[in-house]
């Protein structure tokens, strides 16, 4: 029994010690990761602007004379043509004034004829001393006064005729006529509650105000150019409508407003969009994308290389010895499936494309290089 117990203990000791045979611990295999090289590129700075469409200009229909509104000859909100009759003011009182001016002119002309005859008769009499020089001077003065009176009456008649013509108010431009608050029979004109009857808005071309922060404006335009000379600052100007449709007509630079906004610190650039089919209307929502300034150099990597933790962005950089290191970066614009890096990465460095979830700082990896265009095709970048 004791011999059996001794043998059993020996077997247990042999098993626990591995019978003197030790196996070396196996090392974990290195992680294989796809890598791509960061490249230097030049990308356009695109900005997105939110605004509303406005008419190119508005013509205010304002009576020049007072009178009672006789008729309205257009439909509110409808297109009108240049020269089209919009309103008629009762011309009766003004016509009476015109007739009075005509009568005054005829009287002045008769007085002129009499003064001319007297002067012409007095001239030869003065030469033979039949009348005194003082009398000749009187005839001459009356003649000149009669001529001046005729000119004054002619001007009064022209003014009266113009006033009668002002009783017909016509559109000075092609456009859309707004509603009028005046009704037939209302007393309209300067000094009344109806000093403005309506407004005609030209919509052959519509405008949008683009507010560019001063810092970005100076970066794009530079400090050497006058602030009002921004032709060429904006290119590839595109309008997106409220339903998501991209408008077929590209925009063009109009002008720069003279003042910098004191509340927002922006420079406002006005762009114009042609509206041949009059599909666009003033007040409509507009989202405008445009390239601002020339293309600028930047570092570009595929967007899949970027890791995000809350508002912190980072990449894993593979060193020459195949070790990886964690690197925080500052992002720029997004170009399709490629991402611009403003800070934190240099051209020529290799970054991990896939497999970053299992990495730790300083770990060795087996890098598998991918082409530098692994991020996909280049598209238009948009900056919010």
Image: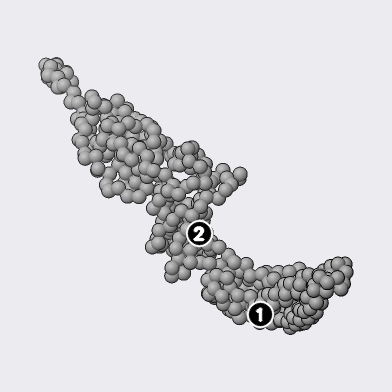
Is 211 displayed left or right of 291 in the figure? right
Pointer 2: residues within 10 angstroms few (<14), some, or many (20+)? many
Instruction: Check the image and report above or below for 318 versus 87.
Output: above
Is 326 displayed left or right of 231 in the figure? left
Point 76% across, 68% down: residue: 191
Instruction: Check the image and report above or below for 343 versus 90.
Output: above
Hey, which quadrant is residue 180 in on the image?
Answer: bottom right
Point 23% across, 30% down: residue: 365
* Callout count: 2
Residue 142 seen in the figure: no
Residue 325 at x, y percent in the picture: 31, 28
Point 86% across, 67% down: residue: 133
Residue 260 at x, y percent in the picture: 57, 45
Point 20% across, 35% down: residue: 368
Look at the image and name its color scheme: one colour
Mark earlier in primary sequence (1, 2): 1
Foreground pick, 156 / 374: 156
Residue 379 seen in the figure: yes
The span from disc 1 to disc 2 (Cα, nearest Å) is 32 Å
Quadrant the N terminus occupies? top left
Foreground pick, 326 / 276: 276
Question: Which residue is denoted by mark 1 in the rendering?
Answer: 88
Using the image, tell me which numbered label, if any, was put on residue 207: 2
Badge 1 marks a residue whose secondary structure is strand
Residue 371 at x, y percent in the picture: 21, 40
Residue lying furthest front in this view?
A: 128
Badge 2 marks a residue whose secondary structure is strand
Instruction: Check the image and report above or below for 327 versus 58.
Output: above
Hey, which quadrant is residue 97 in on the image?
Answer: bottom right
């Amino acid at each position: 029994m004791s011999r059996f117990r001794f043998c059993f203990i020996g077997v247990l000791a042999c098993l626990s010690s591995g019978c003197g045979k030790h196996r070396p611990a196996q090392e974990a295999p290195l992680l294989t990761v796809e890598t791509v090289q960061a490249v230097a590129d030049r990308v356009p700075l695109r900005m997105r602007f939110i605004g509303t469409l406005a008419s190119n200009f508005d013509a205010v229909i304002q009576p020049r004379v007072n009178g009672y509104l006789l008729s309205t000859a257009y439909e509110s909100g409808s297109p009108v043509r240049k020269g089209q009759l919009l309103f008629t003011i009762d011309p009766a009182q003004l016509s009476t004034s015109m007739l009075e001016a005509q009568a005054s002119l005829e009287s002045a002309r008769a007085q002129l004829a009499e003064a001319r005859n007297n002067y012409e008769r007095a001239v030869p009499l003065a030469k033979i001393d039949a009348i005194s020089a003082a009398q000749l001077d009187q005839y001459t003065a009356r003649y000149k006064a009669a001529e001046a009176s005729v000119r004054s009456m002619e001007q009064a008649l022209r003014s009266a005729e113009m006033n009668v013509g002002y009783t017909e108010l016509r559109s000075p431009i092609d456009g859309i006529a707004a509603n009028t608050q005046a009704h037939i029979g209302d007393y309209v004109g300067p000094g009344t509650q109806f000093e403005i009857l309506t407004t005609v808005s030209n919509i052959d071309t519509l405008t949008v105000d683009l507010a560019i922060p001063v810092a970005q404006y100076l970066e794009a335009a530079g400090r050497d150019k006058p602030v009002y000379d921004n032709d060429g600052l904006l290119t590839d100007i595109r309008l997106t409508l409220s339903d998501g449709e991209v408008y077929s007509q590209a925009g063009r630079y109009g002008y720069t407003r003279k003042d910098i906004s004191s509340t927002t610190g922006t420079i406002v650039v006005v762009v114009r969009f042609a509206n041949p089919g009059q599909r666009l209307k003033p007040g409509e929502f507009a989202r405008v994308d445009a390239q601002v300034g020339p293309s600028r150099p930047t570092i570009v990597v595929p967007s899949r290389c970027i890791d995000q933790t809350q508002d912190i962005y980072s990449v894993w950089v593979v060193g020459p010895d195949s070790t990886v290191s964690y690197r925080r970066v500052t992002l720029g614009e997004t170009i399709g499936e490629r991402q611009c890096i403003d800070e934190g990465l240099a051209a020529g460095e290799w970054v991990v494309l896939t497999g970053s979830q299992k990495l730790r700082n300083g770990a060795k990896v087996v890098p598998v290089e991918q082409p530098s265009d692994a991020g996909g095709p280049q598209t238009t970048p948009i900056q919010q």
